[in-house]
Image: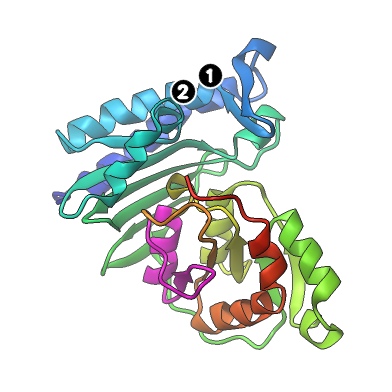
Amino acid sequence: MLKDGDTERVAELMRETAAAELVPRFRALAKDEIRQKRPGDFVTVADELSEQRLASGLAKILPGVPVVGEEAVEKDPGLVGLIARPGEACWVVDPLDGTANFAAGKERFAMIVCLVQDTRAVAGWILDVLGGHMAVATRGEGVMLDAQPVARRPSDRRPLVGFVGYRIRKEFDRQLPQAQRGQLARLSTLNCAGAEYLELLNGRADFCIYRLTKPWDHAAGTLMMQEAGGDAVRFNGDSYEPAQPLNSGLITAARPDALAEARGLFEAVRLPLLASLPKPL
């Protein structure tokens, strides 16, 4: 579906959009330019303008392919159904991943774009806006980080570094026996899925666990994990797909051994976490 040069055109569009809509507004937003869609879920004028610019540019790269943007879905939830259409394509866009960080003046935020074809992610891009790092993956062709191929990493016996939310980390600390807890070096969160996927690609972390799986946060990153030699699975062990229910959960890693070990640890605390998951949309 993508023609020669289109992958680079998407990357350049993302860089141009970040430079025009995000960077100038970082630590420069007025109070009335930040609001909460719901408690703890922030949106800013930068999110909205970034999504508009991305949607316009992507329409020129693949005319007629719809854009499923995070902010557009907020206004029209039915748009998310475009991801699940057999045989059809759509763009899935997070114009500002890590909005709460951005609004608070913290430097961890990203931009994510994914192309979905026949319900599967076929290409993905993640831009570290301030750091300038860019990851690009195409299904069956591997993943690049800063224009360099990400090599498949061998198994590693060291304790795992993982990104998990507060509730999961609390359950790991409370429920895991000491022997299993010793398999973990550090658990934390960057509050930005795009930044966390980049940390997995560069080898500074080993796995991520997410309770909620909004496709604009995870469709591109999970493709990158698969292309790097790892995988992404739901809490029930099935393969992750962008159109899955948002409460299916996600465990992902760039190495098979790290994924297997993280799944084993999660299984020990699984039931209390699943019991508190919200219902599907």
Distance from Cα at disc 1 to Cα at disc 2: 5 Å
Q: Residue at x 19, y 38 (%)?
A: 65
Asked if residue 146 can be seen in this view, the reply is no
Q: Residues within 10 Å of mark 2 (few under 14, many from 20)?
A: some
Picture disc at residue 119: none
> Closest to the observer: 8 or 75?
75
Residue extent of the magenta highlight? 219-242
- In the rendered image, residue 221 lying in the magenta stretch gets the answer yes
At mark 1, the secondary structure is: helix
Asked if residue 279 can be seen in this view, the reply is yes
Is the residue 212 above or below the residue 236 in the image? Answer: above
Q: Which residue is mark 2?
A: 48
Q: Tell me, yes or no, whether the two marked residues, 1 and 2, touch with CB atoms within 8 Å.
A: yes
Q: Residue at x 60, y 34 (%)?
A: 99
Q: Residue at x 63, y 66 (%)?
A: 204
Q: Position of residue 188 (x, y in %)?
A: 73, 59
Q: Amino acid at mark 1?
A: Val
Q: Which residue is mark 1?
A: 45
Quadrant housing residue 16:
top left
